[in-house]
Image: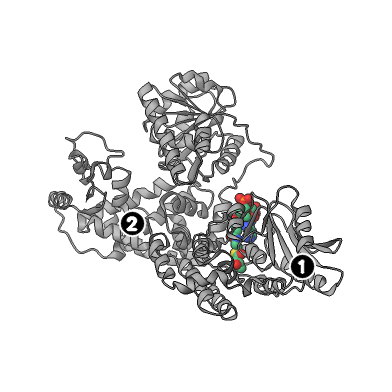
Amino acid sequence: MSPISTKRHGDILIVTSNNPPVNALGHAVRQGLVAAIEEADADDAVKAVVIRCEGQTFFAGADVSEFGTPKAFEAPMLPQVVDRIENCTKPVVAAIHGTALGGGLEVALACHYRVAVPTAKLGVPEVKLGLLPGAGGTQRLPRVVGVQKALEMTTSGTPIGAKEAFALGLVDRLIEGDLEQHSVAYADEVKEVRPLQKTSERDDKLAEARANPGIFEEFRKANARKMRGFDAPEANIKAVQAAVEKPYAEGVLEERRLFMELMSGKQAKAQQYFFFAERKASKIEGLPEDTKPRDIKRVGVIGAGTMGGGISMNFLSAGIPVTIVEMQQEALDRGTGIMRKNYEATAAKGRMTAEQVDGAMGLLKPTLNFDDLAECDLIIEAVFENMDVKKDVFSRLDKIAKPGAILASNTSYLNIDEIAAVTSRPQDVVGLHFFSPANVMKLLEIVRGAKTAPDVLVTAMQLSKKIKKVAVVAGVCYGFIGNRMLIPRQTQAMQLLLEGATPEQVDRVHVEFGMPMGPFQMADLAGVDIGWHRDPNRIENIRDALCAIDRWGQKKGAGFYDYDDKRRPSPSPTVQEIIEQFRAKEGITPRDISDQEIMERTIYTMVNEGAKILEEGMAQRASDIDVVWVYGYGWPVYRGGPMHWADGEGLQKIVDALKGQQERLGSDFTLSNLLVQKAQAGEKFTR
Ligand code: T1G
């Protein structure tokens, strides 16, 4: 049965797609749309057409699950479908709700009119899949919204709201009330309007760019940083440029050429892999089918420091009341003050209104009274990263928290089972590891204790979606998934300094690889003193030596690098001297170290640790490890994630390289059995 059905309302033909969950434009939908337009053209009694969708959303794009399969190339392909719609002899109205994305927006652009409910969103997220709108979108969109807006939308993939779309002329009418009824009424209004306005024939919005061809170079310069390393954004710019410089028929051929070039590339495969990896992460294996989440009406947060405040903001922004506890009034006031300031900074950028700021802060209940947490359904501690302190907090929570309250630790390394063991309710204890800054970073590691109840995990996963986090379930091990893989990377990076590398060289290798920063830049940003024993007289390694002279990183104006008053880094002679002292002390003669060796000792070793995490069951699947690294540490999504990237690099090549480095890696380093087995068997982690 076709997902596309048609029915008549007077002389209007209503074409409905019912293809859950998101009306993806799979082959059957494409076929049905063409048949519906043929039906409209063939019937003189039909004066206009409305295309609408059942369910949660208007077409959310091509069916990504078809990519790489013959179905994606089965006629009619999307370009033919949109052209057939545009060449209908009767006016076609797109009735948009939910999200008109990618091919969905391209279908709407081929319609002669577009109406939408105010909550709808319209966008072209293909760039996030390593692609560009391949069904005329790069040619039609600039003809409706103008070149600058089209460049922004195609290269960011960020959708715009229906109200903005209406202001731009992308939506002809905002519909309050029943969308089907009002879109049919709109079609009735326009059914006699002639000539039909084909989007592909509109030129007015291109004039400005034709008069200012420099717009493309300016755009490239202004966005160089965030587009660095990606292929798709540049291809989108080229395609939009073709819309300006060429007639439509030629521009759409250039779009097709660029699309096929991207589709056949490694980056598109990696980003499409990641699209599904991210969604798979929310599925928790081995839970009873009927596990229901607990009801979380109020969240308690212990600690109003950087983490406690950031964590609280996630819930406040989602409309969930928060009780935040501190021991001193001054700390409480400082923490809540910073939260308000953060919101006000967001409002200053136009991303929140003043009312929303007050609304969020109005849900916050600061208190010095620990017992006030008794009213909370979920309590998250964000106190000092020390096991004794955490155990004390959980012992106290056990006495005052209501039965069924979830007790969560924000620890980034410590053993959740050990913490749970001091309570009478280990089944209610879970780790919720937020990444700093907690109100910004999307990653959340849900740490599953041995006794954590299924409904606690389901609640945590559901709540993560509500607070717009991407959550990954981790097992109880030191550093869980992300930070555990950081350990070999940081260890080797420090060792490489002793052997002859410089912080700049190691960082450059990582930045050129696509990371936002290298190990030493990251240490300076996060704080060189994190985890330091704080005894300036105890100097056992380079890090101790830096901390002992207050070189704690950017916050002190100096760490592995020197910083000017604009926090711009420069190599530090002081640090070089310290490194040389340690080389002399350890009797190491520095040698030239190749970029390849840095890659092998800092990135291959991370992959090896990821394989161990998988082997030990500390991650549910290899793709979860990739989700952690893309969202938690900025691993370039066009490389898919460490495990997907390793598959492409070649597992045997990685094993051989690590074996070759064994002496330098030291006796503590051991190869993952799973990595070796997969390499030998020619298997992969993620493909
Ligand atoms: N194709 C196939 N499956 C899709 C899909 C798509 N486009 N979008 C979502 N799904 C599945 C998803 O895998 C999940 O499946 C379920 O739907 C719910 O998704 C030629 C080439 C629409 C905003 O990139 O942004 O058009 O896990 O969990 O949070 O130019 O889905 O349940 O089995 O994300 O409510 C461009 C991608 C395609 C849109 C809804 N379009 N989707 O969010 O649900 S390329 C996109 C989304 C293209 C043309 C080009 C979101 C959503 P499962 P979900 P959600």
Tag of residue 32: 1
- Mark 1 / mark 2, whichever is N-terminal: 1
The secondary element bearing badge 1 is classed as helix
Of the pair 252 and 386, the residue shown nearer to us:
252
* 545 with respect to 175 (left or right): left
Q: From the viewer's perspective, is residue 62 above or below residue 306? A: below
Residue 27: quarter of image: bottom right
Amino acid type, mark 2: Thr
Mark 1 Cβ and ligand 1 under 8 Å apart: no
State whether residue 449 appears in this view.
no
Quarter of the picture holding the C terminus:
bottom right
At 56% from the left and 55% from the top, the residue drawn is 160
* Disc nearest the viewer among 1 and 2: 1
Amino acid type, mark 1: Gly
Residue 601: horizontal and vertical position, in percent? 32, 58
Q: From the viewer's perspective, is residue 188 above or below residue 442? A: below
Q: Residues within 10 Å of mark 2 (few under 14, many from 20)?
A: many
The residue that disc 2 covers is 602
At 29% from the left and 60% from the top, the residue drawn is 508
Residue 417: horizontal and vertical position, in percent? 48, 33
Q: CA distance from mark 1 to mark 2?
A: 52 Å
The secondary element bearing badge 2 is classed as helix
* 522 with respect to 198 (left or right): left
At 52% from the left and 55% from the top, the residue drawn is 623
Mark 2 Cβ and ligand 1 under 8 Å apart: no
Quarter of the picture holding the N terminus:
bottom right
Residue 620: horizontal and vertical position, in percent? 54, 49
Q: Quadrant of ligand 1?
A: bottom right
Residue 266: horizontal and vertical position, in percent? 48, 69
Q: From the viewer's perspective, is residue 485 above or below residue 393? A: below
Of the pair 212 and 79, the residue shown nearer to us:
212
